[in-house]
Amino acid sequence: MAHASDMHSLEFRLPDLGEGLTGAEIVRWLVEVGDLVAVDQPVVEVETAKAMVDVPCPYAGVVTARFGEEGTELPVGAPLITVAVGAPPSDGGPEGSGNVLVGYGTSEAPARRRRVRPAQPSASPVQPPVNPIPPSASPVQPPVNPIPPSASPAQPSANPAQPSANGTAVTAPEAPEGPVPVISPLVRRLARENGLDLRELTGSGPDGLILRADVEYALRAAAAQARPAAPSRAPAAPAPAPAGTGEIRVPLKGVRGAVADKLSRSRREIPDATCWVDADATELMRARTAMNASGGPKISLLALLARICTAALARFPELNSTVDQEAREVVRFDHVHLGFAAQTGRGLVVPVVRDAHARDAESLTAEFARLTESARTGSLTPGELTGGTFTLNNYGVFGVDGSTPIINHPEAAMLGVGRIVPKPWVYEGELAVRQVVQLSLTFDHRVCDGGTAGGFLRYVADCVEQPAVLLRTL
């Protein structure tokens, strides 16, 4: 390692995460002050209005300061961390990768981090995490050398007196100097909130690493020692709990806040209208069954509906457009970036299938599956959530027949698909039970009139009822 005189500090600021994002919320710190980081090693997990993102540091060195607690919202350009690095290169500029996002140009995996003691203490205090500690995923195992039950963690002492076997008081050895062998910030917080001195523990992990199980075992031992005897008489009745406010407030931030803003803007700016039609999807379902019986990858219903959408947009390009408010122009696209609504634990997101018009049913199926899995795990990139030109919304998965969806601003239209269920239907002049679906189109009335919207929706319904209609566009 370089000598202290050769070290200098570099400040790493929250980078521009693209797509017009102006800030992000710190979800989880991945490093602590004193950690040795490698070039392009992720140092913090943030949540933008688009997605969860791991932010890598472009410098290699020792973390000397962190800025912002978990849960804090920072604007782009605000300091994230400072890193003590070696002597600067001969050209005087800082040596780093220049990368700002994991997966965007990073070619090598970061080296495993290890803890070192910085030459001088950081001027900025370490910000404590604020997220609640998750429950342990596995049964707690006792550590190799927990603190003795007689030592109460609530009142740590630098040199506590302990009774010996013959009753005389002896002085316990002082806590060892040097860094405490703890990696997890959650373990540190658990100990801190319960008044437990980690220097009194010997960890059960590799090389004496203190684990969460060690801390929990020590706290249970101390609680058992301090537990008072049962009272001789019944305790007084507890005081009644204060009345609640009768309301729960949920912050509109992150993905949920971004969705709220976009939907509100859509309602303010777009004069939308909705038309709908019932269609007999029996033949479409039979066609899908036949395709999947022929071998090869299975084709999803959503992929077939997407294929129908792209064919309809080729015939009615007015709906594959957006409105430039300032120029007072309708901008039509020669490509279809197809968005599809996906409900996740973090809220509603709309991943985008790029160049859907150039994909076949098999390719669309694979891409829908990939983006859906990324949406569920929260790993969608900002680029995978923006740039759509038309949206397909399959709300039938929620067991509903119809809807009047809000257009995904700044697009001009959205096709909604309800559930497909057996219903009475007149087929070839006779009443029969058929698989019926309701289709709805919400469109921006500025880009077209009802005739165009009705023609689009009727063509989609015809393809659903007679999939052979699609052969004209293949």
Image (tube, rainbow, N blue to C red):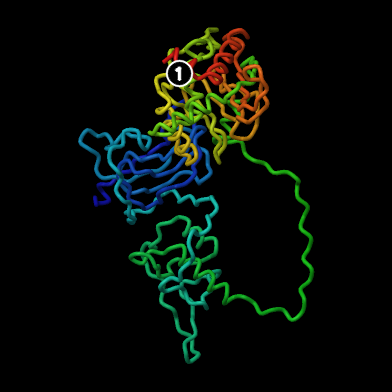
Residue 253 x/y as whole percent: 58, 36
291 relative to 44, above or below:
above
173 relative to 284, above or below:
below
Q: Nearer the viewer, residue 276 or 88?
A: 276
Kindly indicate the quadrant of the structure image that contains residue 404: top right
Q: Amino acid at mark 1?
A: Val
Q: Residue at the location (46% across, 29% down)?
A: 290
Residue 265 x/y as whole percent: 61, 22
- Location of the C terminus by quadrant is top left
Residue 420 x/y as whole percent: 60, 29
Q: Nearer the viewer, residue 259 or 93?
A: 259
What residue sits right under mark 1 in the picture?
A: 336
450 displayed left or right of 329: right
Q: Residue at the location (51% across, 39% down)?
A: 25
462 relative to 281, above or below:
above
Residue 265 visible at all: no
Residue 134 visible at all: yes
